Image: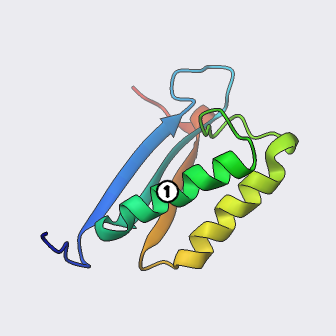
Amino acid sequence: MNQIPDSVYNIYLDESAIDNPRLFFEVVGGIWMRRNKRNEVVSRIKELKEDHKFGTELKWTKVSKRYIDFYKSLIDLFFEYGEEDLQFHCIVADKRKINLE
């Protein structure tokens, strides 16, 4: 079995609210994780979703009080791994201040 070097990362990007004129802010975010931690992190997130009965897709714009404990556990997971193994980055833009022309 091949060892994956520690310096190799998977990067997962997503965006929200780009085409929705009712939402003023656009968010582009990404999760960076060491490739050799991917299976472990994905498994842990699935466990959290099962433990908290979170059966839907994670969405930037659909956070609810009902799942606040799940979201807190997810944040704790990021801090547990530390920035060398797992990171979240995002950019938030006010679409009202962007001139696309």
Q: Residue furthest front?
A: 1
45 sits to left or right of 86? right
User: 44 above or below 28?
Assistant: below
Residue at x 17% of width, y 75% of height:
3
38 sits to left or right of 63? left
86 sits to left or right of 22? left
The C terminus lies in quadrant: top left
User: 39 above or below 36?
Assistant: above
The image quadrant that residue 39 belongs to is bottom left
* SS category of the residue bearing label 1: helix
The percent coordinates of residue 15 (x first, y second) are: 48, 38
Residue at x 67% of width, y 28% of height:
23
The N terminus lies in quadrant: bottom left
The image quadrant that residue 40 belongs to is bottom left
96 sits to left or right of 51? left
Q: Residue furthest left?
A: 2
Residue at x 87% of width, y 43% of height:
65
Q: Tell me the amino acid under the disc marked 1.
A: Ser
The percent coordinates of residue 92 (x first, y second) are: 57, 48
The percent coordinates of residue 30 (x first, y second) are: 45, 53
* Residue of label 1: 43
For the image shown, how many numbered marks are present on the structure? Answer: 1
Residue at x 75% of width, y 40% of height:
63
Q: Residues within 10 Å of mark 1 (few under 14, many from 20)?
A: few
Q: How is the image coloured?
A: rainbow
The percent coordinates of residue 99 (x first, y second) are: 48, 31
